[in-house]
Image (cartoon, helix red, strand yellow):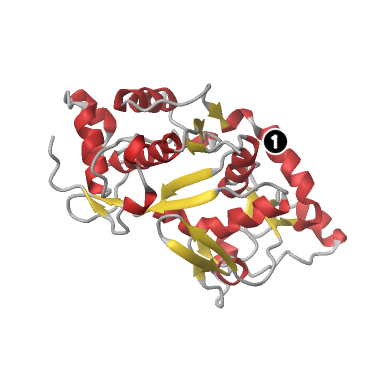
Amino acid sequence: MESTGRFAPSPTGELHLGNARTALLSWLWARSEGGRYLLRVEDIDRPRVRPGMAEQQLSELRWLGLDWDGEPVYQSQRTGLYEDALRKLGENVYECFCSRAEIAVVASAPQGDEGPRYPGTCASLSREERERRRRERAPSLRLRVPPGSLKFHDQILGDHEFDTQATVGDFVLRRADGIFAYQLAVVVDDGAMGVTQVLRGADLLFSTARQILLHRLLGQREPRWAHAPLVLGPGGERLSKRDRSLSLSALRARGVDPRRVIAHLAQISGLERADPSVFSLSKISRKPALLSPLPY
């Protein structure tokens, strides 16, 4: 099967150097194997999307010299696929009427990467109880997560094991306002697009077990995973879309040569140069990459 990588920005804010590093590494991985490289705009959370931001992000990726195969895919145009996936998951999905505040007050709930673990309050509601609650509040949809650990190998960070039921519990697939959750949309899209490589920031490592579970339940081939340590700002802080000084638009406005940006991002990642012909995931540093001082 042909190697296929992807970059999937969300047009809710400007791309910064950390996003650019992820795009570069994922592009290098795909091209080093002679594979396809796809672009997906994750604009499914429409209330948070900034008008014109998707077009700006695509322009900035081209400015960096990155290319992709075919036209970009927009999640907002693919809701039918997510509905089909919910139907395919069948009885693995159930309605949940709990608010975030109600879940948070459960004293025994440990904290996962998306907040308190869901304690399964609505997992066994009767048909009559669901109908009664539906009249009071629109439900979200959750996945019934089986107990036990799930192991996987990360091409950069090595072997990992997560017990999703113990740390997260049954997680949301579609919010009460009708917006599909990231975990479902990204898995459905990766399967439909034939993605075989997923390289992204290490902050998404904890999502991997959930996504593997969904791939398996949907009968999809699992991609290979690679999570790059985060890029940190000059003070060691995590980068934010609100920090315009490190945004691609600010660098472009200052007249910075994009070739210098690419060379710098390769260097802080442990690579000699940004060249697919000599690229290897084994060369990527497992330590966070520090931007200070910027050489441009």
Q: Amino acid at mark 1?
A: Leu
- Quarter-wise, where is residue 185 in the image? top right
Give the camera-side residue of 97 and 120: 120
Q: Is residue 51 visible?
A: no
Question: Which residue position is annotated with label 1?
Answer: 81
Give the camera-side residue of 138 and 155: 155
Residue at 72% across, 43% down: 85
- Quarter-wise, where is residue 147 in the image? bottom right
Residue at 59% across, 40% down: 190
Looking at the rendering, in which quadrant would you find the N terminus?
A: top right
Instruction: Give the structural element (helix, strand or loop) at label 1.
Output: helix
Q: Residue 276: x and y, percent? A: 36, 36
Determine the residue located farthest toward the bottom in the rendered image.
108
> Would you place residue 180 above or below residue 74 in this image?
below
Looking at the rendering, in which quadrant would you find the C terminus?
A: top left
Give the camera-side residue of 221 and 71: 221
Q: Residue 65: x and y, percent? A: 32, 25
> Would you place residue 72 above or below residue 290 in this image?
above
Give the camera-side residue of 209 and 252: 209
Q: Viewed as shown, does residue 151 lie left or right of 257?
A: right
Q: Residue 109: x and y, percent? A: 56, 73
Q: Viewed as shown, does residue 91 lie left or right of 141?
A: right
Q: Viewed as shown, does residue 247 lie left or right of 190?
A: left
Q: Is residue 177 visible?
A: yes
Residue at 72% across, 64% down: 122
Q: Residues within 10 Å of mark 1 (few under 14, many from 20)?
A: some
Determine the residue located farthest toward the right in the rendered image.
128
How many numbered marks appear?
1
